[in-house]
Image (tube, rainbow, N blue to C red):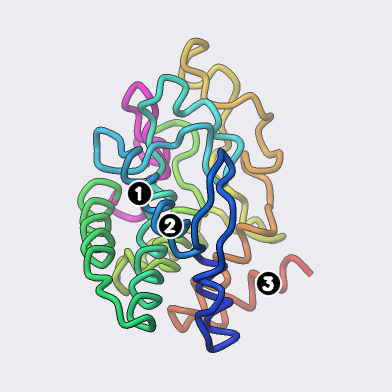
Amino acid sequence: IYTAYQIVKEEGKTDILFETVPFYDGGEGTVLEHLERSIKFSLDNIGADDIPLMLESDWNDVLNTVCKEGKGESVMAGQMLVLACKQLVEIFDLLGKDGSKYQEIADWQTKVLNDFAWDGEWYIRAVTDFGMKLGSKDEECGQIWINSQSWAVFSGSADTERGNKAMDSTLKYLDSGFGLISCYPPLRRNYPTPEQEITFMQPGVGENGGVFCHANTWAIIALCMLGRNEDAYKIYSEMI
């Protein structure tokens, strides 16, 4: 949806939405049908807390064991769902179609995220199969994660007050002086228990507490969206 949305904005026309392309698992449909099915896929894979399931992982491959039993949920995927639905509403408006059902999904998921995933100073990152809130200040490891803060702003699921507070926490806990680390403190082996271990990646490496430029870019965009240009430039400058 993000790609189709940007192409339509760039070209100023909607022709691409009616091109017929194959589905990965057989058959074919228009690009618009693909976009709508992607939302349906998310809605068909909603967890017990009304947040999309993590499945094999979302953006962060470190979290590939969160949903081993098919119950773990991704707050980031919920935030991505909000933005995708909002963009689909705009696409439908351009086509003269009624996209209100997608606005309703965006509003519903926004409420879920703010009621369930807000931890007081930032948004949690995920819920594991066994119900642990990963990204909570109550945990020993992975108390705060970069992506669920930046995507709260990026998607508009956070209002200005919460967005600023989440990014304040991001700068406070994740700024290494060489860019923002992906989480703090990094996950360790056998956490929380050997049977429920969340990741096999070593602490401080890549998506487990390393400085990941891709994730920093989203944070820089979020800071700019909040009008915090000096903070955005500071993080950008640290990585040069």
Query: Residue most toward the top?
Result: 195
Q: Mark 1 = which residue?
A: 40
- Relative image position of residue 34 (x, y in whole percent): 47, 56
Mark drawn on residue 80: 2
Question: Within the magenta stretch, is there residue 207?
Answer: no
- Relative image position of residue 24 (x, y in whole percent): 59, 43
Q: Amino acid at mark 2?
A: Met
Badge 2 element: helix
Please tell me in which quadrant of the rendered image residue 95 appears: bottom left
Sequence-earlier tag: 3 or 2? 2
Badge 3 element: helix
Looking at the rendered image, the disc whose residue lies closer to the viewer, 1 or 2, is 1
Observer-nearest residue: 24 or 134? 24
Q: Which portion, as a residue range, is magenta?
A: 118-138
Q: Amino acid at mark 3?
A: Tyr
Mark 1 and mark 3: Cα distance apart in space: 36 Å
Please tell me in which quadrant of the rendered image residue 235 appears: bottom right
Q: Amino acid at mark 1?
A: Lys
Badge 1 element: helix
Q: Residues within 10 Å of mark 1 (few under 14, many from 20)?
A: few
Mark drawn on residue 236: 3
| Looking at the image, residue 67 lies above or below residue 219 | above
Q: Is residue 149 left or right of residue 107?
A: right
Question: Within the magenta stretch, is there residue 137?
Answer: yes
- Relative image position of residue 125 (x, y in whole percent): 42, 44
Q: Residues within 10 Å of mark 2 (few under 14, many from 20)?
A: many
